[in-house]
Amino acid sequence: MWSMTGTARRMFELLEPICLVTYFADECNEELAALGHRTYWDGYFASRAAPLGRVPAQVVHAAFYNFAEGEAARHIPSAWETIPPEASVAARERGSAASLRRILGEELAGSPGLVRAADLTTKAATSAPTEGRVMYAGMRTLAVPSDPVARLWHSATMLREHRGDGHIAALVGARIGGTEAHVLSALAQGIHPPESFGRIHHLPKQRLAAVVNGLRERGLVDADGRFTDAGRETQQRVEALTDELAAPPYDALSPAELDELIAELEPISARLVAAGSR
C-alpha cells in the first residue's frame, strides 16, 4: 500500500521518462522545425506556452518560473507571429508520440498494457482541481488524444505540469527564486560548482555570482558554494512538499488501479530510461 506522497514520487519517477522524449528525442524538434521555428528554444517556448493562449512574455516568464529574466521574451511572442500556437501544440504531440513509438518498439507501443496505462493516467490527469495550477489548467483545455501512445504522453505531460505548478508553489513558499532553485538542484545532484549546471551555465557570470552570494548570505550555501545543513534541509523540504502537492490527481484511482498503473508503467518507463528518452 502506497502513501499518497509516496505514490506521487513513484509516479513522477515512472512518468518523467515519458515526458522527456519531448525535450531529448529528435522527432519533436524536427516537427517544430518543419513548422518554421528557427531554434530549439523557439519551439520549446511556443509549444509549451501555447495552452495559455497568446499571453505576453511576462506571463510566460511567471508561469515557467525557472528561466532567467529576459529569456522568455527572446521567444515570446515572436515564435507565434507566423506560426499559430495551435500548430505548435499539435507538432509537439506528433513528435513526442513518434519518439515513444520508436523507442518502445511496435510490440510494447501496441500492447494492451500501454492502452491500460494510458487510460488510468488520463483518469488521474483529468481529475485534479485546477485552482492555482496555471500550466496544468492550460493543458486541461486541450483535447485528449484518442491514440493510446499520444494519450499516454499527453496525460503524463498534464501530470508533469500539475507537479510543476506545485513545485513552484513550494519554491515561492520557501522564498527560492527560479535560478536559485537550479543552484540547489545542482548541488542535490552532486554538481559542483553549481554554476556549471546545464540549465544555468550560459547565464552571465556576474548574475550567477549574485545568485550564489544571495544563497550564501541566507546561510543555504557555504563559502565553497556547497550545501550548508540549512540549505540541504530547505531543498529536501521543498521536494517533500512538491510530492505532497502532486498527490491529488491520484485520489481518483482506487488502490487496485494505482497498483495496476504502476505495474503497467514499469516496463514502459524502464525501456525509456535505458534509451535515455532519446
Image: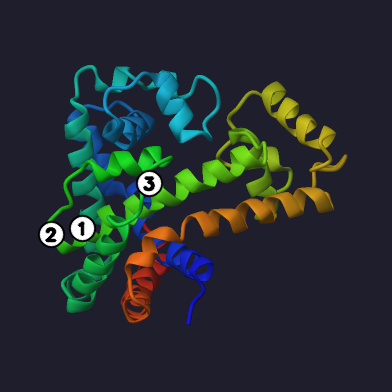
- The residue that label 2 is drawn on is 147
Question: Residue 151: where, in percent of width, then height?
Answer: 20, 58
Please state which amino acid type lies under the numbered disc 2.
Answer: Asp
Q: Residue furthest right?
A: 223
Q: Is residue 270 left or right of residue 185?
A: left
Q: Which corner quadrant of the image does residue 133 belong to?
A: top left
SS under mark 1: helix
Q: Residues within 10 Å of mark 2 (few under 14, many from 20)?
A: few
Kindly indicate whether the residue at mark 1 contacts the one at mark 3 (C-beta within 8 angstroms).
Answer: no
Question: Residue 127: where, in percent of width, then height?
Answer: 30, 57
- Viewer-closest of 122 and 196: 122
Residue 197 visible (yes or no): no
Query: Could you tell me how far apart the alpha carbons at marks 2 and 1 are, in whole angstroms?
Result: 6 Å
Q: At x 53% / y 47%, what residue is drawn?
A: 167
Q: Is residue 50 left or right of residue 258?
A: left
Question: Residue 259: where, in percent of width, then height?
Answer: 37, 80
Marked residue nearer the N-terminal end (3 or 1): 3
Query: Could you tell me how far apart the alpha carbons at marks 2 and 3 are, in whole angstroms?
Result: 21 Å
- The residue that label 3 is drawn on is 23
- The residue that label 1 is drawn on is 151
Task: Name the disc covering residue 51, or none.
Answer: none
Q: Quadrant of the C terminus?
A: bottom left
